[in-house]
């Protein structure tokens, strides 16, 4: 059994080394020639898995250690009898904590705002529901919008109401271009106009959920505070856009050590199911201990005192801006930021809560 794995996957050797021969490759430059002797392919969202990559190869199992699947040509995989799996929810906790960290970085006073602050969450899947739960721990009011699900614990409203009434809007939808509820350019000029100028906008889902040119025009007009972890034309990111956006990060919202490890665990379990192997490994045995920042402090006290130690989002912003060359983010530098991303732990590792 031969496995080709994205070199940036966490704990790949721990999970798979005794099950198969593993070759590690850069996911963005993976080619058909790399797969001529490969039965199982393990990827992230930077690899487009389609006929161009797989035609004529012996690949029979594809797994992505990500929530999203828009980089997988699922009809092709299913038509050719190739088993596929993803890691839905693997980094949901990390993304929820990222959003709260960004909001508290922009407005530290929100720690004591309680229900005077309303967070609007668009998309109530794994990430959106966890974010809602964490926001409620801070006492914030939460509106949710998702035409596909009904969450009893979240007050759901239509998108127009959410955009008009929320103090911050956070996007957590998949990329969908067809059907009854497309999300491509969901946030366009018309919907941006429904936001009050002081409403914060955060996107850590998929870049093209926001129409980039419309967003840039809106920021110029309103001076809106915006947080972007994803970009419509990623990794082609212009300095013009970065100069307008308040906080930018290199598609790392879900990059906690737990989120990465959990994603690999989930595709390991799918691999074991495919090949009828015993599941006998747990990523939690591989994680180092952390400073107990939440010990003897309540949630708000701990966040005020230690949040920048848990996750310094301003450093991620500075690192991405430093990648600009001749008006554009340098793609190898962007990829290097993600490949060499420093250790980041979820709040629970420090004794804090999780949803």
Image (cartoon, helix red, strand yellow):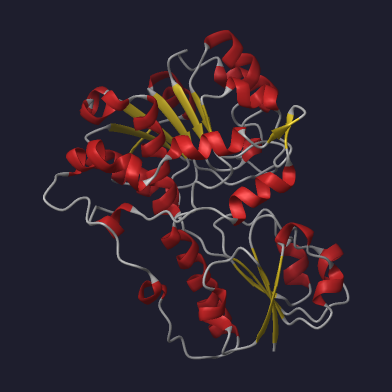
- Say whether residue 154 is visible: no
For residue 311, which quarter of the picture?
Answer: top left
Left or right of 121, for residue 351: left
Left or right of 325, for residue 189: left
Above or below: residue 330 compared with residue 240: below
Left or right of 218, for residue 265: left
Instruction: Give how far across and how far down residue 56 sits, in percent.
Output: 88, 76
Which residue is situated farthest in the left direction here? 296
Instruction: Judge by depth and name the residue closer to the eye, 133 or 159.
Output: 133
Above or below: residue 118 compared with residue 196: below
Which residue is situated farthest in the top direction here? 221
Left or right of 270, for residue 156: left
Instruction: Give how far across and how far down residue 230 sits, in percent.
Output: 60, 39
Instruction: Give how far across and how far down residue 211 sits, in percent.
Output: 66, 28
The quarter of the picture where the N terminus appears is bottom right
Residue at (65%, 66%) from the top-left corner?
7
Instruction: Give how far across and how far down residue 48 sits, in percent.
Output: 75, 58
Instruction: Judge by depth and name the residue closer to the eye, 174 or 263.
Output: 263
Residue at (32%, 34%) from the top-left corner?
142
Residue at (78%, 64%) from the top-left corner?
30
Residue at (56%, 24%) from the top-left corner?
245
Instruction: State the count of labels.
Output: 0
For residue 154, which quarter of the picture?
Answer: top left
Above or below: residue 138 compared with residue 65: above
- Say whether residue 176 is visible: yes
């Amino acid at each position: 059994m031969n496995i080709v794995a994205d070199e940036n996957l966490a704990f790949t050797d721990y999970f798979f080394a005794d099950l198969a021969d593993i070759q590690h490759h850069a996911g963005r430059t993976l080619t058909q020639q790399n797969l001529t002797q490969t039965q199982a392919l393990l990827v992230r969202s930077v690899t487009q898995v389609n006929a161009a990559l797989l035609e004529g190869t012996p690949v029979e199992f594809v797994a992505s250690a990500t929530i999203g699947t828009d980089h997988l040509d699922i009809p092709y995989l299913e038509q050719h009898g190739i088993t596929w799996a993803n890691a839905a929810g693997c980094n949901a906790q990390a993304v929820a904590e990222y959003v709260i960290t960004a909001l508290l970085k922009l407005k530290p006073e929100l720690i004591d705002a309680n229900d005077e602050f309303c967070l609007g969450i668009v998309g109530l899947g794994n990430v959106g529901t966890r974010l809602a739960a964490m926001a409620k721990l801070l006492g914030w009011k939460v509106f949710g919008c998702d035409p596909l699900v009904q969450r009893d614990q979240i007050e759901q409203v239509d998108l127009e109401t959410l955009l008009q009434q929320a103090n911050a809007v956070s996007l957590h939808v998949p990329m969908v271009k067809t059907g009854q509820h497309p999300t491509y350019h969901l946030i366009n000029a018309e919907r941006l106009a429904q936001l009050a100028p002081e409403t914060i906008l955060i996107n850590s889902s998929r870049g093209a959920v926001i129409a980039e040119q419309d967003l840039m025009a809106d920021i110029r007009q309103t001076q809106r505070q915006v947080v972007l972890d994803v970009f419509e034309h990623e990794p082609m990111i212009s300095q013009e856009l970065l100069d307008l956006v308040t906080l930018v990060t290199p598609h790392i919202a879900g990059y906690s050590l737990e989120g990465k490890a959990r994603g690999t665990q989930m595709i390991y379990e799918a691999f074991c199911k495919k090949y009828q192997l015993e599941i006998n490994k747990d990523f939690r045995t591989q994680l180092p201990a952390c400073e107990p920042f939440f010990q003897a402090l309540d949630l708000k006290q701990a966040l005020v005192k230690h949040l920048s130690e848990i996750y310094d989002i301003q450093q991620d912003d500075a690192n991405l801006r430093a990648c600009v060359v001749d008006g554009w983010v340098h793609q190898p530098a962007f990829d290097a930021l993600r490949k060499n991303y420093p250790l980041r732990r979820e709040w629970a590792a420090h004794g804090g809560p999780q949803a």
